[in-house]
Each structure stands twice: as C-alpha cells, then as structure tokens.
Amino acid sequence: MNNLLVMPILIPLCTAVILMFLKEKVLLQRWISVFSGILNLVLACVLVTRIHKEGIQTLQMGGWTPPYGIVFVGDMFAALLVLTASAVSLGILLYSFTSIGAERERFYYYTFFHFLLVGVYGSFLTGDIFNLFVFFEVMLISSYALISLGGTKLQLRETSKYLLINIVSSTLFVAAVAYLYAAAGTLNMAHLSERIAEAGQGGVLNVIAVLFLIVFALKAGLFLFFWLPGSYGAPPAAVRALFGALLTKVGLYAIIRTFTLIFAGDPDFTNGWIAWMAAATMILGALGAVAYNDIPRILNYNVIVSVGFVAFGLSAGTPDALDGAVFYLLHDMLGKALMFILGGLIIAAAGTDRLERMGGLIQRYPLLGWSFFALALALAGIPPFSGFPGKVLIIRGGLDAGMLAFSLIGLGSSLLVLYSLIKVFRLAFWGNTPDTEQPKVNLKSGTAVAAGLLVLVILMGLGAEWVNPYISQAGDVLGSPGLYIEAVLKE
C-alpha cells in the first residue's frame, strides 16, 4: 500500500475548501493556489520515480482488499498523466493571474479550478469503474461553473448546450456501469478484466462496451464532438486552455484504460469501431480547422484532430502504437495548453479574434509570434519538437497493423493542422496592419508562461530517448493487462 497515491487528489481538494473561505482575498488565493500546484508537481515527480523503480503502486482505502473495497492504482501511464497535468495546470494557473479578470477571481474561480483538478487526478488514479464516474462528475460540475463564470450571453448559451450533453452522457455512464455490474458482478477494473475474460467477451458484453465507448467519446470529443467547438470557445482563454489540455484527455484516458484492460477480449470488434471513429474525427476536425477564420474555432478543431490521432494509436494496438499513443497524449496536454494560452495572447494583442482584422503583430510582439510558429511545428509533428516521436510511433504501429489508409489519414490531418496554424501565424503576425491599430498591451507575464511551456515541449522532443523508458513502461501495462491485474489482486 502506498498513501502517496491519494495525495494528488487530497491536496487540490483541501486547497479548494480553504479557498472557499477567502472570497475577497484574491492575492492570498493566488499564493495558496501556486503553493498547492508546486507541491502537487513535486509529489507527482516522486510518484513517477517510485513507480519506475518499484512497479505499479496500489492503495486499498479503509483496508478493504480488492475487489471489495475502493482501490487507487498508480501505474506508469496514470502517473505520467498526473505529472503532465500538474505541470500544465500550474502553467495555466499562472496565466490566469493576468488574464481571467478580478471579477471571476472573486467569484470562486480558483476554488472551481482546484475542484476540477480533483476530478482529473482522481480519474487517472482510480481502479474502480464507479469511482471513475464519481470523479468524472466532480470534474464536470466544476467545469459547468468555470464555463459559465462571467455570465456573458455567449457563455450562458454554450453552457446550456454543454450541460445538456454532459447530463445525457453521465446518464448513459451510470446505465453502462449498472449493466456491467449486472453482467460481471464487480466494479473493480482489474476484477472486471478477469471476469470478462473468463466469460468470453461477446454478445451483451460487446453491447455494453459500445455503450461505454459512446459515453467516453462524448466526453473526449471522439467523433461525437459537435458540442466542442462552440462550448470551448465561450469561456476566457485560461479556461479554454484548462479544458483543451485536460478535460478531453480524461475522456481519452478512460477509453484507453477501458479498452486495454476491461474490454480487451475482442479487439477486432472494439478496435474496429475506435479506428473508424478516429479516422472520421481526424478528417472532420482537420477540415474544420482550415475552414474557419476566427482563432477560437481554429484552435478548438485542432483539439479534435489530436483526439482522433491518439484514438488511432489505440486502435492499431501494436506495442509501438500504444507507446506512441502515450507519448502523443502527454505531448498534446502540453501542446494544447500552450496553444490556447498563445491564442489568448494573440487575441489580447489584436483586440479581436477575427484573422481578417489582424496583421503586423510580429513588429510589436516578436517573441509571441515565433513562439506560435514553434508551436505550429510541434503540433504538426515536426522534429525536434515533442509531437514528432509520438507521431512516428503511432504511424509505424499503424503500418505494422496493416492500417495503411488510417495512417495516411493521420499524416494528412497533420498537414492540415500545420496549414491551419501557419494561416494564423501568417495573417496575424505578417498580414497588413489594420487602419485602427490596437494600442500595445503588456503581455510579458503571459508570454513568460508560454515560453516555459514551450521549453517543456522542446525538451520532451530533444529528450525523447530519456523519456522513452517511462513511456515503454506505461505501454507495457496497456499491452499486457495481466501486469495491472496482478498488481491490484495480488493479495
């Protein structure tokens, strides 16, 4: 047993409760939030190091041995996600100080921020399918508050849509958990894997698997992404960064964990569904990214493309593809946070989100411009940035699995991603300066945060060989669910 597993959940939970009583003391809220974020980042580093040396860690709450009690499980995949989420959330938190606005800060922005992190970390670390639902709801309830905080007409309209979609998906989630418990008689993920393998996946279990796929696809924006471009465009840039970097990734994590552990018995059926959904997501997301001329929608559709690409890696199912999916997922958390922060800075500098009304920003904001250019290369998978190793592994895994057409779709979507972001770079920074030029805005603090995240993106690409042992350890558990089962049910 390792009590360290619960600390990434406990720290933001305690922080959120404390901040509830400090409504008017914004500066104190900031300091406490930063301290909490740094502490969680340090603990995540310790957790990753311990798992790398000692293997999968478990914690049985209340001393109840699995499968009867609540269990938290930290394998390398979950630990790397917790570590990356900690780094990303700290960066977004720092960016929030100068971008979110005093009114939102006084109305419990930081409280909801930390409650959302409770749901994110809990989703990564839980070993129980019902507790996954509970942590999803903690995360989503916090996101309802964050997306509506400010009360603009656009926010209220998109909040209604976002709320309705997630209520439907949560209802389906509860129904899927109930059907699964009726069929297998347990909710512990490791025990579910054993029971389903013994019963033989097929028939009603495949129907339940599809129901879970629909639920998590709605959460992640995999094919069923119709709600995402509008909803993610409503809140401020800091909230968009938080959603794009973390919320969709929790949905992707749930798909990967569920279909490599619980419903791993009929990969031809489940992976076939995931592959076609991934292909459609990449195609439609890439077309959306190149079709629009407002920055929020271009960036939102880029989120959708990456969701499809990670899902393609899962559907290929080879060791290289699974390693690539893990690597690319970590890269995408950093990349999407950076993308939305830079997008918010560009909009603040130009005074508009419409590309046709921008131009000439490179003269006044050169660091911002070249940072965005480097980001475009990273998200397209150009070396030496962090998008390259994961993309190569996924494409190689897809070719090894005989998925040539899907691999070509992945490459084509990468080119369209590059085109869409270079279009932003060209029109915003090199286009003709508008007649009514926006006064220069102080973006130093936001640009410094973006520069820090960009350094991580570059280091992750240049240090891919150093990162690879951790990625391989995560991929080994995904490819061999027996390792996870043995660690959880070893008693």
Image (cartoon, helix red, strand yellow):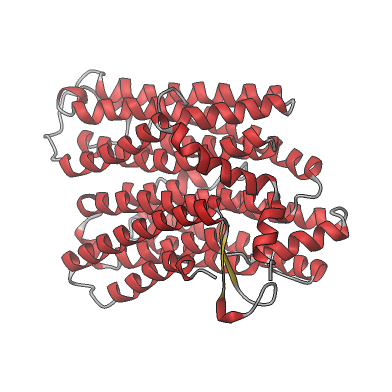
**Residue in front for this viewpoint, 45 or 408:** 45
Q: Could you tell me which residue is drawn at 86 percent across and 53 percent down? A: 202
Residue 396 vertical position relative to residue 352 in the rendered view, above or below: above
Residue 153 vertical position relative to residue 306 in the rendered view, above or below: below
**Residue in front for this viewpoint, 352 or 191:** 191
Locate residue 172: give its quadrant: bottom right
Locate residue 155: give its quadrant: bottom left
Q: Is residue 98 left or right of residue 121?
A: left
Residue 355 vertical position relative to residue 74 in the rendered view, above or below: above
Q: Give residue 165's position: percent from left, percent from top.
A: 57, 57
Q: Is residue 303 left or right of residue 15?
A: right
Q: Could you tell me which residue is drawn at 17 percent across and 71 percent down? A: 25
Q: Give residue 407's position: percent from left, percent from top.
A: 64, 25
User: Where, quadrant-wise, is the C terminus in this rendering?
Assistant: bottom right
Q: Give residue 325's position: percent from left, percent from top.
A: 57, 39
Give the total of numbered labels: 0
Does residue 293 appear in the picture of this structure?
yes
Does residue 292 appear in the picture of this structure?
no
Q: Is residue 424 left or right of residue 226?
A: left
**Residue in front for this viewpoint, 335 or 428:** 335
Q: Give residue 231's position: percent from left, percent from top.
A: 46, 49
Residue 218 vertical position relative to residue 273 in the rendered view, above or below: below
**Residue in front for this viewpoint, 152 or 394:** 394
User: Where, quadrant-wise, is the N terminus in this rendering?
Assistant: bottom right
Q: Could you tell me which residue is drawn at 65 percent across and 65 percent down? A: 488
Q: Could you tell me which residue is drawn at 44 percent across and 36 percent down? A: 466
